[in-house]
Amino acid sequence: MLGPGRLARICRRRQEVHSVCWPLAEGDPEVGGQKLQLSGECLEARERARGRGHRTSWTPRRHSSPSALSSAQLVYPSDFQLTDKEKGSICYLSFPDSHSGCLGDTQFSFRMRQCGGQRSPWHSEDRRYNSGAPVALQRDPAHYFGYVYFRQVKDSSVKRGYFQKSLVLVSRLPFVRLFQSLLSLIAPEYFDKLAPCLEAVCNEIDQWPAPVPGQTLNLPVMGVVIQAHIPSRVDKPEPSPLKQCDQNLLPAPVVLASVHELDLFRCFRPVLTHVQMLWELMLLGEPLLVLAPSPDVSSELVLALTSCLQPLKFCCDFRPYFTIHDSEFKEFTTRTQAPPNVVLGVTNPFFIKTLQHWPHVLRVGEPKMSGDLPKQVKLKKPSRLKTLDTKPGLYTAYTAHLHRDKALLKRLLKGVQKKRPGDLQSALLRRHLLELTQSFIFPLEHYMASLMPLQKNITPWKTPPQIRPFRQEDFLRSLEHSGPQLTCILKGDWLGLYRRFFKSPHFDGWYRQRHREMAHKLEALHLEALCEADIETWMKDKSEVEVVDLVLKLREKLVRAQGHQLPVKAVTLQRVQLYIEMAIGSLPKDLQAVLCPP
């Protein structure tokens, strides 16, 4: 836990933190501000609360235990509390490090671990959202995302000579573009009018519809309508321009092209020549320290790095902005064990000294132009890493497995020369990374599909056959005829890359997810086979114990299917319910009473 002395330093800095949390699962913090009495519910919990008869307003609670947090006020639902460690983390992460000379307005983001594991309830609505959302955008029950709008301007009326304040929005969803757009509307007004502005905003947010994958939502706030499409896993990788839901909306909506995608070209502009090597490091889950001049550069670069594996889920830890005051500082900097699989974004040069044992360090400076292309960082050996005056560069001994795509760099450079819009440059870069990831994953998907039992071998009255085990050597042999060379022109040591990938957290995460999906599909096929069978004929020569066992198994499958865990059609569920009633009707009255109590 944070000691009182450390927390007191926040208060001495005379910095004020307010937290606005748009919770997308019941139990998350709602909205913060000074002495606000807010009506309404959290975004998704609204319908759940009404359905269960819960009260429809959250009572704000002011932190009163640590006096150093008197300037940090948050509001919670009645069944939720932040720990002292989480409060301290939010306070420290809400302001740029003292080494960052951030004047004016700055937006950045952070990610923090929830202490003590999952505390808030995980409801069926949360599972429903995750079942329809892309794996990379699913709600994370163990972490919070924080989106910060920080203002620092000269103010002679303040003892330190500067006005410093942050408005923070906390969510479990990585919708960085949406939340930054929301903060850019709220924060400037809030810094002028304070609490009354937040209260009005909260009342509007209370009326927002729940985020449903695949839907385009109109989100009114402060006289503006934000129109945003919630991504779905059935969306095409490169969505077409967003169509407005209602052409008669007044005022005209602010249409977001994406709720989560960053300007990749701007984020990667100092490292364009090393994008492919960085893609490999992300794919292999390698520890990477990113040292940037400011929190906005740090957080955007880390989020860009972790997004370059899409549609593959990034299964390692990542911290877009991290400070020495973080409660996990010792965990990440210990030398008694191998560096953790984490991408760490920092601004304090002290980390260069502390994490010299890390295998990969990327230091970027302030953007500088070199001709038509921003000046590129150079590839350097880790031995040249110095403590204080370390120059920008990618310090690593790693040798890329794949050859560099020089054609991509030429196209990007040509785009700069012709003043091609940044969004088109980013689309070009994103498409390249997407195709590279798909070319790598496609052989794995093809081999995994071959491990699925044939549908003709699935019979209603027998346990379904098992999925065959994944044998790495068999897969590597299959690459000769179905490898990435079929869809990717890049040459290199693909086999070596796959062998290292097998040892990474991303292979484990990908395999577990695919195996779980295949197991659910297998169970759904078995359920359909049961529904197509003649259950009356089967029950004629079966004992009461066998019939009861069938009823219990069908009920279990029905509950799982209704909870959106099995991919089955509605007509199949109806037939299962009919078979359950038919089986129970064939039993004696005493057993019927047990299975169907009044």
Image: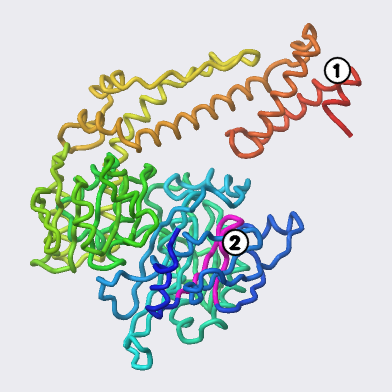
- Residue positioned most to the bottom: 157
The local crowd at label 1, few if under 14, some if 14 to 19, many if 20 or more residues have their Cα within 10 Å, is some
User: Split into 4 quadrants, where in the image is the N terminus?
Assistant: bottom left
Residue 124 in the image: above or below residue 175:
above
Residue 116 location, x and y as percent? Answer: 51, 49
Between the C-alphas of marks 1 and 2, the distance is 47 Å
Residue 455 location, x and y as percent? Answer: 53, 19
Residue 548, picture quadrant: top right
Mark 2: amino acid: Leu
Q: Nearer the viewer, residue 124 or 228?
A: 124
Residue at horizontal 34 percent and vertical 58 percent from the top: 320
Along the horizontal axis of the image, is 506 left or right of 454? left
Highlighted magenta segment, given as a residue range: 17-33
For label 1, the residue is: 587
For label 2, the residue is: 43
Residue 53, picture quadrant: bottom right
Colouring method of the image: rainbow
Comes first in the chain, label 1 or label 2: 2
Along the horizontal axis of the image, is 462 left or right of 242? right
Q: Is the magenta region chiefly helix, strand or loop? A: loop
